[in-house]
Image (cartoon, coloured by chain):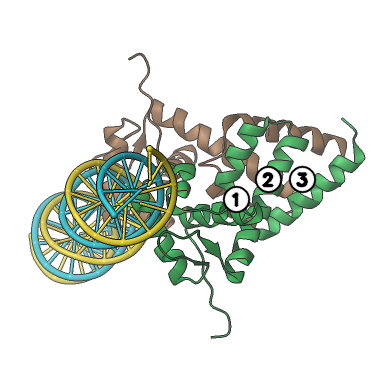
Chain colours: A brown, B green, C cyan, D yellow
Amino acid sequence: MITEEKSLSSGLEDYLEAIYIAHMNNKALKGAELARELNVSRASVSEALAKLVSKKLINYNSYEAISITKDGIIQAQKIYSKHHILENFFEKVLKIDKAEASENACKIEHIISQNIIEKIAHFTDKYTKTRKD
Amino acid sequence: MITEEKSLSSGLEDYLEAIYIAHMNNKALKGAELARELNVSRASVSEALAKLVSKKLINYNSYEAISITKDGIIQAQKIYSKHHILENFFEKVLKIDKAEASENACKIEHIISQNIIEKIAHFTDKYTKTRKD
DNA sequence: AATAATTGTAAGGTGTACCTAACAAATTGT
DNA sequence: ACAATTTGTTAGGTACACCTTACAATTATT
């Protein structure tokens, strides 16, 4: 096997995404804080982090800040970019308010195909360049 | 309580949608056939049908064709219309092939908000009327 | 009608993702 | 430094949505 394909559940993708965002913001993130952000128990975070560690997407030792690996960043970027593209399309093209756009993007980002996402990105791009409203 | 709010899981929505489609096509549908269509076991169908019956969305007696109730039709139409709107948008606006459009619509239909769906429907409508390609 | 094929259900099991409660370990405040 | 707070893990549970196996009931075939 050349590349280990590690497809994540929606749930694990959410954890990874939050870790990635903290990483991008240079914000030290501990499990308890992650639990608060995602509205789950510390126990659930504990389990989820163990899975992400076993998939080598994060590094983590109790009581330290969670860190994301290179592989983790690659995975997270895919998800996060989908999120952005969807949110953008909802806001800019469909004129949906930020809250609803984000909320829907959060769910759809986990299941939409790469191909469609690329088309949406392209479409939004063209659309916002054509129109000024 | 005036209206019983019955929000279904993605899975139950899939069962109901398949039953609705059979109903629309005047096709008698039995559990075993539904299992084949949805690629699940007869046992899983049996459980799912029991849940839909308890929610009064279908009527069902062993060895008979499954029938959908008025409430079931209302629920199913909402899902099915979301499916159509998404599929249409993917095909007509984004030029995605039917298979991928349908596949993605099948997943997204369960989680996207009514508001966004309406905007997409309106957008696709305007878009296909403006352009001839 | 008897046999074969189909359809359905029940029981028991898996995996996932949550939870609470209790406890342990580390960090922080005074 | 030591008490209080925060953080983390473990154990045991729930709920869901699947599954297989085995058996029961119905329907179709000959």
Q: Is residue A99 visible?
A: no
Residue under label 2? B86
| x then y, percent, for residue D19 | 30, 43
Q: Residue at x 57, y 66 (%)?
A: B72
Viewer-side residue, C23 vs D3: C23
Marks 3 and 2: in contact by CB < 8 Å?
no
Residue under label 1? B109
Viewer-side residue, B111 vs B82: B82
Identify the amino acid type marked 2.
Leu
Q: Residue at x 80, y 52 (%)?
A: B122
Q: How many numbered circles are shown? A: 3
Marks 1 and 2: in contact by CB < 8 Å?
yes
Secondary structure state at the residue bearing disc 2: helix
| x then y, percent, for residue A42 | 29, 56
Q: Which mark is residue A93?
A: 3
Q: CA distance from mark 2 to mark 1?
A: 7 Å
Q: CA distance from mark 1 to mark 3?
A: 19 Å
In the picture provided, is B54 more to the left or to the right than B120? Answer: left
Q: Residue at x 47, y 35 (%)?
A: A76
Within 10 Å of disc 1 (Cα), the crowding (few <14, some 14-19, many 20+) is many
Mark 3 falls within which chain?
A
Vertical arrangement, residue A15 with respect to residue B66, above or below: above
Q: Are marks 1 and 3 on the same chain?
A: no
Query: Most extreme residue toward the bottom, as rendered?
Result: B1
Mark 2 vs mark 1: which is more N-terminal?
2
Identify the amino acid type marked 1.
Glu
Within 10 Å of disc 2 (Cα), the crowding (few <14, some 14-19, many 20+) is many
Mark 2 falls within which chain?
B
Q: Quadrant of residue B133?
A: top right
Viewer-side residue, C20 vs B93: B93
Secondary structure state at the residue bearing disc 1: loop
| x then y, percent, for residue A69 | 37, 29
